[in-house]
Each structure stands twice: as structure tokens, then as C-alpha cells.
Image (spheres, grey):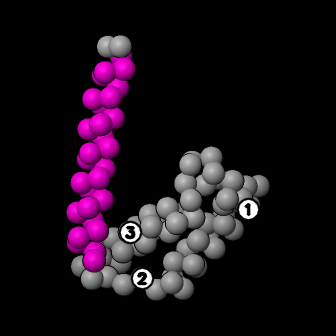
Amino acid sequence: YKLSSELNKRYAKQTLDLLITKEIAFNETKNINISKEELNAKITQIEEQLKQQGQSLDSVLKNQNLTRKDLEDQLLLQMKVEKSIAEK
């Protein structure tokens, strides 16, 4: 029970930190636009890299309990942050 309690405390803080960071990044990049074509190109790039490793995007997502929508959301935020940094 003590170990479980300690793990809950540790991961709860990490999860909270991640959510806060994600919210800050979202707010800081809300005026930056990423086109559907840019997003699709990034997904295609990832699919090609995985194919070279003998994997498929769908299987990797399934193993990580993610959907394509989850991936798109994560990539969109990442690409907005990268574009924001590049513009500064």
C-alpha cells in the first residue's frame, strides 16, 4: 500500500505538470496555424520511418493506447510550438 501511495503521488505530480505544460503551450500557440497538409505530411513522414523499421503506425498507436486523433492532436501542438520558436 505504501508503494502504491508513493507511486500515485509521483505520477499525479508528473501528470499535473504535463497537463499544465500542455495548457500553457496551447495558450501560447493558439494564434499559430498549421495546415491540414502540413499535419498530413508529418504523419506520412512518421509512417515511412516506422515502415523502414518494420512497423505500422496503427500497431504502434495501438501498443501505446493512442488513436490517430490523439496523434494528430499531439503533433499539432508540437508543430505549433516548433513554429512559434522558429518565428522568435
Q: Tell which of 4 and 51 is nearer to you.
A: 4
Task: Please give the count of numbered marks on the rendered protein.
Answer: 3
Please, is residue 52 above or below residue 16 in the view? below
Please, is residue 12 above or below residue 50 in the view? above
The quarter in which the N terminus is drawn is top left
- Cα distance in 3D space between marks 2 and 1: 25 Å
Q: Which residues are magenta?
A: 3-30
Q: Is residue 13 magenta?
A: yes
Q: Which mark is residue 1?
A: none
Q: Quadrant of residue 61?
A: bottom right
Q: Which mark is residue 34?
A: 2
Q: Secondary structure at mark 2?
A: loop
User: Which residue is the site of mark 3?
Assistant: 77
From the image, give the main secondary structure of the stretch colored magenta. helix
Q: Residue at x 27, y 29 (%)?
A: 9
Q: Residue at x 23, y 63 (%)?
A: 24
Tell me which amino acid carries mark 2.
Ile
Dot 3, crowdedness within 10 Å: few (<14), some or many (≥20)?
some
Q: Position of residue 43 (x, y in %)?
A: 58, 71
Q: Work out whether mark 3 precedes mark 2 in sequence or the reverse, and give the earlier one.
A: 2
Q: Position of residue 29 (x, y in %)?
A: 28, 75
